[in-house]
Amino acid sequence: MRNSYSSLLARCFMLIVAIFWAATGAETLAHAPKPEVGHPAPDFTLPALTGKAVRLSAFRGQKAVLINFWATWCAPCRLEMPTMEKAYQTYKAKGLEILAVSVDAGSKSGVKNFMDELGLTFPALLDPKMEVLGLYRFSAIPASILIDKQGIIRLRELGYRDWTDKESTKMLEQLVR
């Protein structure tokens, strides 16, 4: 009898430990943003080309955000940027912000010249050490993250995308509602 009582106590203790571990572990995981669709976008702060610091979480509750990782030497990025500018002009008044995160390691004058040459008016942020690119677990460019107004990732895209095509337009329309 005593053996079964000890066994029952041991099982109850293990169950309590398992429940406590699951509860605290789940809480920790719930607060760790994952850069995946359906999860909160990890926050970051980067300097803009203008020198002003831009924090992603500042847009939460106010604007949908398209983050695009790119570089001046990237041919697909050069093709994609004009479609982003058109989308920006169409949707910025409706609540879309575009953050073009340059991973160029050179001087910011190269980034400025690129932006000026293509007539891009959305903010360019500087990530020369590719820390934010790594935070979002991308290892190639161009890469994009589309975030809704509540800060939830709705799209992860690797490679070129035409932000003015029918599918993209539909997605952007839904996000700015």
Image (cartoon, rainbow, N blue to C red):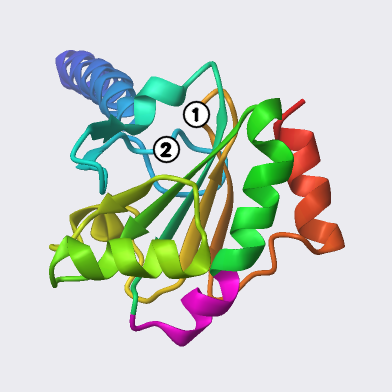
Residue 29 versus residue 23 in the image, above or below: below
Label 1: state its secondary structure. Answer: loop
Q: Is residue 77 magenta?
A: yes
Viewport quadrant of the C terminus? top right
Residue at the spot 52% in from the left edge and 82% down from the top edge:
76
Q: Main secondary structure of the magenta part?
A: helix
Q: Which residue is mark 1?
A: 151
- Answer with left or right where residue 126 lies relative to residue 145: left
**Residue 93, image x and y in percent?**
67, 28
Residue 89 versus residue 43 in the image, above or below: below
Which tag, 2 or 1, sits closer to the chain's start? 2
**Residue 72, image x and y in percent?**
34, 75
Q: Is residue 93 magenta?
A: no
Residue at the spot 79% in from the left edge and 39% down from the top edge:
173
The magenta region covers 73-80
Viewport quadrant of the N terminus? top left
- Answer with left or right where residue 10 lies relative to residue 163: left
Work out whether residue 68 or residue 36 is closer to the camera in this orientation and state it. Answer: 68
* Contact (Cβ within 8 Å) of mark 2 with mark 1: yes
Identify the image quadrant of residue 29. Answer: top left
Q: Does residue 55 appear in the picture of this structure?
A: yes
Amino acid on which disc 2 is placed = Ala
**Residue 48, image x and y in percent?**
26, 43
- Answer with left or right where residue 34 lies relative to residue 84: left
